[in-house]
Structure formats: structure tokens, C-alpha cells
């Protein structure tokens, strides 16, 4: 790397040198954060030799801000502004800037520094990246540590990787604490060690220009997150290195694994088109870069697993991603992914991918990440719920930021000995940080935040460097709660969690009640007795439902009762176990744990501790009415006992009678659909109970809402609860109106 040369006149500006770097700022997300980004770039300790901005079809004040920054008489950071159409990709913007710089300056420098309009580097970010690159000539791509834009204490980006299913993954699966703050049990110097990774985010990434030109830059057919991984993979395949440098910092408003940057979401939610483009890009990236053997095994494996993964995503409440998985499978079948052309365009020996395998996320790491992510989500939900009810979490240890005896160091001075060399001690990892024992970090809103108002004004947005006249310390209203992670604490959190204890306790009680303490064991899939007659098999249930004549009460041509439809649909997945008879047995035998869990989940809006909620749910599950219904074979009573709590909670949410305790914006449409579907099942088995719920919903609609809710939305919620279940059960509701006695639940074989 060429030596740094001093600038002519700094005039008090902290920038004291320039480097042979062409910086390219791509603007496409809007002007909201651009002023902070430009202010951070003006405070760089090492300035790029040339600095260009590319405006990709923005329609706000971005063009004016860039033009003002590039004025010749102003000491701004930019040397010029280019404009592209809004449909141009990130790679096209970078390529246009590089070609323009070569025409304008000849040799703009040996490095490219790629910048986003939502990523603000710290003053020494570029200097640290250049020093690490100078110490290792084989380094071709280097990326900084990404911190949260709103809370720079949290790490959101530490290198990119990819698993064998083609999923793009960042270093930290969940936001963790900045290791330089020294709150974890891992030594900060050790955690800040430079690491070899598969790829880094293109935000503030430093790329050797000759390598970028040799590999033809980013693949424009891929979304940004996939193009970043594709470029890093190709760089690693050439024998060069991609490094994550935690000593260099940036604040980033979006994480690379969240999808393509740009207008990919609608109302803050991932759209089907964006999810499909990302999923197809991920699979194309993986299959285009793996070796020949992995490619031949990967295509049928991804194709066969597309449907199960789509079902799992649908069950977990992610329908856009489920549809994207199915479209990806269709693309593999029809050849729309154009994998052969993608593999040929890379033009390298398939054996060159073998050295990259250690940088991929393996199956064991995925399982461990899934467990730790689930644990972290559980801890965060518990701590936030406890904070909402004003209760301190007993397992949470010191709050606030830890204080160190000496100031936190960044840049080269913060790196451990040997981290800047080419040494063989550098880690090769799918993640850019080593934080196995760090605590789970939970940002908890400060109840007094925003009310203290030391100066009576709104606090400015925190920046990675000091503002003029400021102290440089971000003014954050959220308090950080640290919950240590160790084997004993994980087991205790998982095993002694109130809903887990509730579910296990009620399951054991049900096994004892229906097995050991019963006169005759009822632990079988063929239950009958009391008011319950033996259920027909799956074929018999569907035949009875579809036939035009039913031999009941002397014979009738009326439509079949909807209970047969419910049993037929639910019995399909359980066909190997007996079909409808297995469904009936499961509902009756598992009535206690299902009713308890339903009551616990339905009580989330109530501001009480989880222990009290679990206790109340256990009392509800053990009500004599529900237990008697299970013993006597009253399927209608058992179904009503299980569905009443979630239906009441759903109606309260639709009518604005209960505040939401779930983070993020409530999904009104999803709540309406789930509530209507549950009400349809209840109406099929216990229509009288459904009528009572409708009357309660009307009374609730006439009551004033507890949370702000529009009258039209409340009316739509009431209409969906009343009309959608009836529409699902047609034509049976018309039969019930004409013949009220036919509303009873059939108990025969049909």
C-alpha cells in the first residue's frame, strides 16, 4: 500500500492524511440519515484521495444534500455526484463510479471504499482498515464491525456467511453487546481479533480495486445481500482473504441478512416479491459457488426440502417467506435460476471451493445458533414483560453500561498483538466475532426516558463521533439488561420457565388421570363410551360428509354437519395413526395441557408476572366442567374449553379492548383470520357457545376501546368474527336456522 501523504491545510480538521482510495457513496434509501453520514465522513482521520456519490433515483432531498456537499468552494467530502435511474442496482452504481473515476483521474487509487447512505463510519474506520490491509498483502476485502444505528452499543453485523440451505447469515444471530465495552466474560482484545470470513457487508467495505475488476464486481442479477456473499466467496476462491476487522466501526441502520436494501418492504413488512428475489438469489449464490459434488447433491436436496420448509415457515407465521420457498423450488424445476450459466460465468476450478468450506455455517453451528437464538428470544420476552409490569428480573445482572478503568480504545491500538500481521494465528470462522460466553443483551425502555429533559429539548440522534460541542457519548433512553449465558442458566431458563412447567405439569396430570388413576386406561387412539361413539375412519368421514343422503333419524337429505369436515381435515395428517379417531383421542386426552397453554398465551396483554399467569392458566385448565367433559366424552365441551381463551383474546384485540404487549405493530389481518378460523371450529362443535361469544363481541363493540382504534376497523373486526365463521360452515348455518334441533354434534360413525 502506498504511504499516507499529509494534506495541504487541515485548518483544525482532524483529517491529517489521504490515502490512495476511491470512495463511492451509493444513495438510494433517502435523506433521513444522509446528513449524519456526510458529517461522519468529514471527520475521517484518513481521507480518500477521491470521493464520488451516486444518486440512484431518489425523490427527496438527497440530490440537494449531495450537491451542496460537492460544491467547489465548500470543504465538503465529495468530489462529484453521479445520477442513475431508480432501477439500477448497487453493483451498477459502483461500476459507474469506478469507470467515471478512471476517465476523470486516470488512476483513482488501488482501493475502493464502498459506502451506503445508512452507514456512518467512525473517524478512524478507514485508517484501521488500511493498516490491517497493509499488514497482510493477501487481504482483498475488509469490512468493519457494524453497530446499531439507534443504539451503537449493540453489534448487528460481524461478517457474512451462508449455510448449506443457501441462507445468508450475519456474524451475530441476535444483537449482542459491543465487545469493546468489556461486559462479557471474553477479553475485549481477544474478541476484537481480525477474522477470516466468507464475506462482509458492502457498507464501509474496503476492496482492492484490481481484484474487483478481475472478478467483474458484483453480480447484478442478485440482491445486494446475496451479491455481497457471492463476491466474498469468489475472492476466497482465488486464494485471497476476506477479513472482518472489529477494530473498525460503523453504525448501520440495516443488516445485510435482512434482505435487499431499497424499497423491498411495505409498511415495515417483507413483501412476497422481495422475499422471493432474496430466496432465489441465495440459492443461486450457493449453487453457483459450491463444488461439483455439492452442486449435484444440493439441487435435489433443496428441491425436496422446499415444501417442508414452506410449511414450517407458514406455521411459524411467515407466509411471504413460505411462498418464496415454494417459488424457489419452482425455479429449480423450471430452470429459471439459470444455474448453469451462473456456474460457467464464475469460470474457476470446482476444487477451488474446498478451501471455503470452513467459512460456511455448518449443521452443528446452525443447531447451536437456533438453540441460543431461541433462548435469547425467551429471555428478551421475559425481561421486557417484567419491565412492563414494573418487576425486576431475578436472573438479570447489572443494568446500564459497564464502566472500565480506562477509556475504550478503537482502531489499531485496540487490536491484540499480532492481529495486524499475516500470522497463522488468525481465526477462520463463519462469524467475525468470538463471543461464546457473552450475556444476552436486552434493551429495556426507560419509563422515565424522554421525561427528564435535562435541556428541555429532544436529544439529538447519537453519532459515532462527537458532535460539535458535545461529549461524544450517545444519549440513549433504553437501559441495557445483561443476562449471563452458561449451561446452568440456559437449562434453568428452559426447564423452569413458567409455561414449560405449566405444560409439563398438566401433561403429567393428564397421563395420570387418564391412565394410572382411571378405572380403565384411556390412553389409546380408539376412544368411545359415555356420549362418545366410535369414530369412523378417514374414508368413512369424508364419504359421510360428501354423500347427499344421511341415514340418521329415519334418513335426511340435509347437508352433513361441519364437524365431519373438521375431523376430515384434521385427520388427514394423522392418517397413519387412525385419522379422525386419533384426532378425537388427542383432543380428549390432551385437553388439560392444551387448555392451560391456550389460557396462558391468551393472557399476554394482562400486566401481571408470568408466574401468576401460569397459575391462573392451570386453574382454568383444571376446571371441573372441562375435566368432566373429557371423562364423559363430550367433545363439544372439550373443544369449547380449549378455544374460549384465545377467542376472547382475539375478540378483545380486534375491538381494541386490550393493549398489545407484543413488540412491533400488531397484525390486525392475521388476528382476524386466526380468530375467525377458531370461531368456525367452535361453531362446528358448540354453536350455542359461539352465539354467546357473538353477543359478548357486540357488547364489547358498544364499550369504549381501551386503546386508540378507528371505528371502521372495530366494525370490520366485529363483522369478521360474526360472518367469516358462518361463511366457512356454509351451508350448515342455513340448516340450523330452519331446524334448530339439528345443531347438535353427531356422535355416530356417519
Image (cartoon, rainbow, N blue to C red):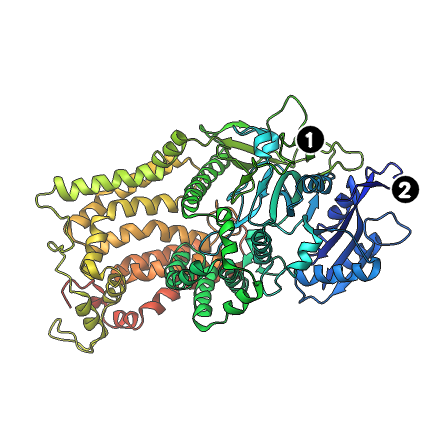
Q: Is residue 602 above or below residue 311?
A: above
Near mark 1 (Cα within 10 A), the count class, few <14, some 14-19 or many ≥20, is few
Q: Quick check: 171 left or right of 548?
A: right
Residue 704 seen by the camera: no
Residue at the spot of label 2 = 8
SS label for mark 1: helix
Q: Are marks 1 and 2 in contact (CB under 8 Å)?
A: no
Q: Residue 715, how many percent across, how many down?
A: 48, 61
Q: Residue 431, how many percent across, how many down?
A: 53, 43
- Quadrant showing the N terminus: top right
Q: Residue 680, how many percent across, how many down?
A: 33, 62
SS label for mark 2: loop
- Quadrant showing the C terminus: bottom left
Residue 685 position by quadrant:
bottom left
Residue at the spot of label 1 = 413
Residue 330 seen by the camera: yes
Q: Quick check: 697 left or right of 537?
A: right
Residue 639 position by quadrant:
bottom left
Q: Quick check: 564 left or right of 290?
A: left
Identify the mark nearer the N-term, 1 or 2: 2
Amino acid at each position: 500500500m502506498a504511504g499516507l501523504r499529509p494534506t495541504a491545510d487541515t485548518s483544525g480538521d482532524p483529517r491529517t492524511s489521504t490515502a490512495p482510495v476511491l470512495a463511492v457513496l451509493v444513495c438510494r434509501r433517502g435523506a433521513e440519515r444522509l446528513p449524519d453520514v456526510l458529517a461522519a465522513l468529514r471527520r475521517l482521520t484518513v481521507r480518500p484521495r477521491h470521493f464520488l456519490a451516486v444518486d440512484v433515483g431518489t425523490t427527496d432531498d438527497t440530490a440537494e444534500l449531495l450537491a451542496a456537499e460537492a460544491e467547489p468552494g465548500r470543504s465538503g467530502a465529495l468530489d462529484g455526484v453521479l445520477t442513475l435511474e431508480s432501477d439500477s442496482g448497487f453493483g451498477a452504481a459502483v461500476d459507474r463510479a469506478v469507470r467515471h473515476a478512471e476517465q476523470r483521474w486516470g488512476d483513482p487509487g488501488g482501493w475502493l471504499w464502498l459506502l451506503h447512505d445508512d452507514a456512518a463510519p467512525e473517524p478512524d474506520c478507514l485508517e484501521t482498515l488500511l493498516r490491517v490491509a497493509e499488514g497482510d498483502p493477501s487481504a482483498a476485502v475488509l469490512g468493519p464491525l457494524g453497530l446499531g444505528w439507534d443504539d451503537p452499543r449493540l453489534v448487528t453485523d460481524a461478517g457474512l456467511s451462508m449455510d448449506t440451505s443457501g441462507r445468508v447469515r450475519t456474524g451475530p444471530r441476535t444483537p449482542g453487546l459491543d465487545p469493546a465495552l468489556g461486559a462479557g466474560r471474553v477479553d475485549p482484545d481477544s474478541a476484537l481479533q481480525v477474522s477470516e470470513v466468507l464475506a462482509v457487508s458492502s457498507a464501509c467495505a474496503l476492496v482492492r480495486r484490481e481484484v474487483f475488476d478481475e472478478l467483474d464486481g458484483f453480480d447484478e442479477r442478485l440482491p445486494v445481500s446475496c451479491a455481497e456473499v457471492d463476491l466474498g466467496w469468489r475472492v476466497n476462491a482465488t486464494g485471497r482473504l476476506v477479513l472482518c476487522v472489529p477494530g473498525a466501526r460503523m453504525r448501520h441502520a440495516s443488516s445485510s441478512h435482512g434482505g435487499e436494501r431499497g424499497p423491498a418492504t411495505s409498511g415495515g413488512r417483507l413483501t412476497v416479491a422481495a422475499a422471493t428475489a432474496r430466496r432465489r438469489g441465495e440459492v443461486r449464490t450457493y449453487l453457483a459457488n459450491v463444488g461439483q459434488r455439492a452442486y449435484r447433491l444440493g439441487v435435489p436436496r433443496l428441491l425436496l426440502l422446499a415444501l417442508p420448509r414452506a410449511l414450517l415457515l407458514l406455521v411459524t407465521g411467515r407466509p411471504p417467506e413460505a411462498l418464496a420457498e415454494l417459488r424457489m423450488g419452482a425455479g429449480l424445476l423450471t430452470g429459471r435460476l439459470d444455474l448453469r450459466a451462473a456456474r460457467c460465468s464464475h469460470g474457476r476450478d470446482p476444487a477451488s471451493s474446498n478451501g471455503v468450506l470452513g467459512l460456511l455455517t455448518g449443521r452443528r453451528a446452525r443447531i447451536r445458533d437456533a438453540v441460543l437464538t431461541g433462548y435469547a428470544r425467551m429471555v428478551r420476552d421475559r425481561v421486557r414483560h417484567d419491565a412492563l409490569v414494573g418487576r425486576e428480573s431475578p436472573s438479570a445482572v447489572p443494568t446500564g453500561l459497564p464502566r472500565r478503568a480506562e477509556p475504550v480504545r478503537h482502531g489499531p491500538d485496540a487490536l491484540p498483538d499480532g492481529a495486524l500481521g499475516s500470522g497463522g494465528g488468525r481465526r477462520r470462522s463463519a462469524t467475525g466475532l468470538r463471543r461464546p460466553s457473552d450475556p444476552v443483551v436486552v434493551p429495556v425502555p426507560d419509563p422515565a426516558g424522554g421525561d427528564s429533559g435535562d435541556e428541555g429539548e429532544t436529544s439529538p440522534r447519537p453519532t459515532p463521533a462527537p458532535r460539535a460541542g458535545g461529549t461524544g457519548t450517545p444519549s440513549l433512553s433504553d437501559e441495557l439488561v445483561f443476562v449471563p449465558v452458561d449451561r446452568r442458566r440456559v437449562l434453568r431458563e428452559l426447564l423452569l420457565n413458567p409455561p414449560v412447567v405449566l405444560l409439563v405439569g398438566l401433561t403429567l396430570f393428564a397421563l395420570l388421570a387418564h391412565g394410572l388413576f382411571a378405572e380403565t386406561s384411556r390412553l389409546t387412539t380408539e376412544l368411545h363410551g359415555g356420549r362418545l361413539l366410535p369414530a369412523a375412519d378417514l374414508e368413512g368421514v369424508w364419504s359421510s360428509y360428501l354423500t347427499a343422503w344421511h341415514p340418521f333419524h329415519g334418513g335426511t337429505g340435509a347437508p352433513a354437519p361441519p364437524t365431519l369436515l373438521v375431523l376430515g381435515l384434521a385427520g388427514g395428517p394423522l392418517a397413519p395413526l387412525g385419522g379422525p379417531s386419533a384426532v378425537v383421542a388427542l383432543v380428549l386426552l390432551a385437553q388439560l395441557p392444551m387448555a392451560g397453554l391456550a389460557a396462558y398465551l391468551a393472557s399476554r396483554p394482562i400486566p401481571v408476572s408470568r408466574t401468576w399467569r401460569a397459575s391462573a392458566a392451570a386453574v382454568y385448565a383444571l376446571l371441573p366442567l372441562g375435566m368432566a367433559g373429557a371423562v364423559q366424552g363430550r367433545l363439544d365441551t372439550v373443544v369449547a374449553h380449549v378455544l374460549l381463551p384465545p377467542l376472547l383474546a382475539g375478540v378483545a384485540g380486534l375491538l381494541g379492548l386490550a393493549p398489545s404487549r407484543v413488540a412491533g405493530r400488531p397484525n390486525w389481518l392475521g388476528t382476524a383470520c386466526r380468530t375467525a378460523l377458531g370461531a368456525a371450529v367452535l361453531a362446528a362443535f358448540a354453536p350455542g357457545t359461539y352465539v354467546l361469544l357473538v353477543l359478548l363481541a357486540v357488547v364489547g363493540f358498544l364499550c369504549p376501546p381501551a386503546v386508540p382504534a378507528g371505528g371502521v376497523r372495530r366494525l370490520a373486526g366485529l363483522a369478521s368474527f360474526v360472518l367469516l365463521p358462518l361463511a366457512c360452515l356454509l351451508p350448515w348455518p342455513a340448516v340450523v336456522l330452519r331446524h334448530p334441533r339439528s345443531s347438535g354434534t353427531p356422535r355416530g360413525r356417519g
